[in-house]
Image: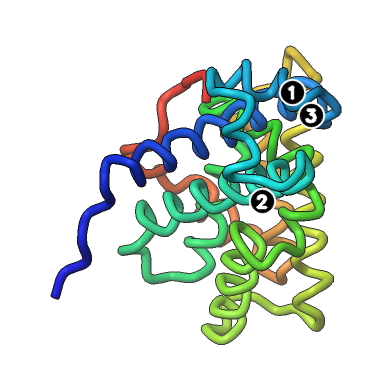
């Protein structure tokens, strides 16, 4: 039997929860923390004050959910647009190129990812397990060489975050150039020959790359 669609009350609760998460993402992206009152959060979400505790026990729990949602939604989108790419090295590189471009395409999500760097590196959801999966697949296919996947993942996350910060702080920086150069250097770190690394970084990106938006 197919699952029953959510009731009107359940849909309303989901909308309220998502409104709180999006408000938390916006505040966190602007401030780098969630050190505001719950009243300010609910006002930003345009929901009643009492609604907060129907979904979260604390601001810390809400922040964890906000970061997790940002990571998961982007990682799920990457899986969708790259589902037909067979080469795991290309999947890894294109995922990284698209993520670096979030500074331009989805600036709020980019700021959430940059602020939640620990989650980007080691969380059991979102980019960390996806990147580890892609690295392991590329090693198994003979495309990457590394002695320690954990260290390789840390180097990848650090390079990506630094590149995104550079794009956000240098008004003269080209997001595309910085993101692609970061990926080029990471591919070299994995032992890929320069010509092959440059070929991969020059591949066209998915046609349905998200357009610039306030999200």
**Where residue 144 sits in the image (x, y, percent)?**
64, 75
Residue sticking out furthest to the front: 50
Residue 168: mark: 1
**Relative height, residue 138 to residue 113 (above, below):** below
Contact flag, marks 1 and 2 (Cβ < 8 Å): no
- Seen from the viewer's position, the closer of residues 81 and 73 is 73
**Where residue 125 sits in the image (x, y, percent)?**
61, 63
The residue indicated by pointer 2 is 184
From the viewer's perspective, tell me whether residue 12 is left or right of residue 22: left
Residue shown at 61%/81% (left/top)? Answer: 139
- Image quadrant where residue 169 sits: top right
Circle 2 — which element? helix
The residue indicated by pointer 3 is 166
Circle 1 — which element? helix
Residue shown at 83%/31% (left/top)? Answer: 33
Mark-to-mark CA distance, 1 and 2: 20 Å
Give the class, few, some or many, for how many residues have Cα within 10 Å of label 3's Cα (few <14, many ≥20).
some
Mark-to-mark CA distance, 3 and 1: 5 Å
Residue 186: mark: none
Q: Earlier in the sequence, mark 2 or mark 3?
A: 3
């Amino acid at each position: 039997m197919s699952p029953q669609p959510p009731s009107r009350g359940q849909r309303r609760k989901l909308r309220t929860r998502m409104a709180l998460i999006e408000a938390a993402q916006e505040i966190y992206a602007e401030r780098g923390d969630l050190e505001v009152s719950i009243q300010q959060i609910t006002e930003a979400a345009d929901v009643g004050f009492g609604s907060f505790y129907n979904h979260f026990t604390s601001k810390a729990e809400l922040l964890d959910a906000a970061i997790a949602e940002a990571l998961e939604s982007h990682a799920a989108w990457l899986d969708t647009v790259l589902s037909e790419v067979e080469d795991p090295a290309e999947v890894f590189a294109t995922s990284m190129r698209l993520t670096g471009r979030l500074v331009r395409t989805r600036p709020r999500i980019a700021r959430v990812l940059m602020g939640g760097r620990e989650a980007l590196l080691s969380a059991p959801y979102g980019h960390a397990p996806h990147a580890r999966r892609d690295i392991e697949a590329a090693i198994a296919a003979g495309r990457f060489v590394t002695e320690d996947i954990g260290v390789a993942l840390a180097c990848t996350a650090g390079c990506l975050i630094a590149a995104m910060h550079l794009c956000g702080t240098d008004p003269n920086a080209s997001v595309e150039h910085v993101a692609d150069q970061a990926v080029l250097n990471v591919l070299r770190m994995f032992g890929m020959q320069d010509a092959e690394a440059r070929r991969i970084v020059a591949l066209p990106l998915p046609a349905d790359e998200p357009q610039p938006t306030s999200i």
